[in-house]
Image (cartoon, rainbow, N blue to C red):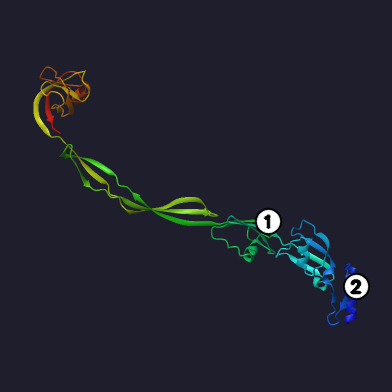
Amino acid sequence: MKPTARLLVYLGAALTFGTVFSVGYVAVRASSGVVAVSDYESAVYPYQIEIIPASKTISPSFVNVSSPYTDANLILQSNSITAYPEDKIITFPDPSWGMGGLIKLERAPVVYLDDGGQKSAIRTWSATVLEMMKTNNVAPLGTSDSITPSLNTEISDGMTVQITRVAITDEVNNQTIPYNTIRENDPNLYRGQSFVSQAGVDGETQLTYRLVRQNGVLVSRTLINTQVLTQKKDKIIEIGTRLKIGAVFNYQQATYNPFLPDGYAASDYYGGGVDLLIINKDNGKSVEIKTWPGGNQGSNIDLSENDFINISSAGSSQGRLYDVTIEQVLN
């Protein structure tokens, strides 16, 4: 096209969009066909801005503006219209020609991502959730992770994508097994004596727990294995039960005294506070008692009713025991 014809086309376009020159003059560069405006700051150019929402259910909106700028982003910014990096801007003709024209701003769909509790808004032209994750450097799903909706779901404006990050780890704890103390009677050891026949040693067990965390929050802790590393060894204490016997009196008799408390006997011979072992020779039953201050005014030994019944062959408090051995207990 010849320079003259090109000038006429550009001027016709300028008139069509209603370009207003308040000051200055038009200069023609024959080599490029570009219309230059002197005193640039005094010139404004008409633009029709079409804003196309990402949602298909919302109709586009139109704004008519005048601007001295010849850069689409500056034109939008100066008119308080935000253009995000992901949005598409289409112009006709190029604003740098200084003629005004049409600016089409197509919004990128917005996806609200909740990735393990970390929330963000992502503007994307990706076709599916999987593609959106790849193009926005979202970490791939782990073996136990879950996502809603599925990876093959098509992207739509305003949708929410929720990823639950699941971490499964094992926790190992060592735990002491305390030893027990066991007391065993030793008939060969005098009563009142004792000794440790086996020292106690604590054991140790290893407990393994399976920990499950969702988005960093512990949701379960399950014992999955127990292993004994060291067996415990119980402490054994031998307790003497053998009585040290002093004086022994055979062929004694015993009766019961209803006024004596259990565990006590009355005898003039022994006086009060003496430990005695009363043995019924007829059945071998015995009872250990302590003499009550004050005797029974006779050769017999008086027992409480229950003590008498315990060693009586008849199992009652009736009668008298005729063959009783009385042993003095020294320990």
Quadrant where the N terminus sits is: bottom right
Quadrant where the C terminus sits is: top left
The image position of residue 228, as x and y in percent, is 34, 53
Which residue, as the protein is rendered here, is positioned at the far top?
297
Q: Is residue 167 above or below residue 24?
A: above
Q: Is residue 75 above or below residue 149?
A: below
In the rendered image, is residue 89 in sight?
Answer: no
Alpha-carbon distance for marks 1 and 2? 46 Å
Judge by depth and name the residue closer to the eye, 249 or 66. 66
Callout 1 crowding tier (Cα within 10 Å): few <14, some 14–19, many ≥20: some
Q: Quadrant of residue 56?
A: bottom right
The image position of residue 60, as x and y in percent, is 80, 59
Residue at image x 20%, y 24%?
Answer: 307
The image position of residue 94, as x and y in percent, is 80, 72
- Residue 29 appears left or right of 242: right
Q: Amino acid under label 2? A: Gly
Judge by depth and name the residue closer to the eye, 197 or 146. 197
Q: Quadrant of residue 208?
A: bottom left
Determine whether the residue tagged by mark 1 lies in a helix, strand or loop.
loop
Tell me the residue that label 2 is attached to. Answer: 12
Determine whether the residue tagged by mark 2 lies in a helix, strand or loop.
helix
Q: Nearer the viewer, mark 1 or mark 2?
A: 2
Residue at image x 76%, y 66%?
Answer: 74
Q: Amino acid under label 1? A: Met
Callout 2 crowding tier (Cα within 10 Å): few <14, some 14–19, many ≥20: few
Specify the label residue 159 is tagged with.
1
- Residue 32 appears left or right of 322: right
Residue at image x 54%, y 56%?
Answer: 166
Judge by depth and name the residue closer to the eye, 151 or 174. 174
Specify the label residue 36 is tagged with.
none
Q: Are marks 1 and 2 in contact (CB under 8 Å)?
A: no
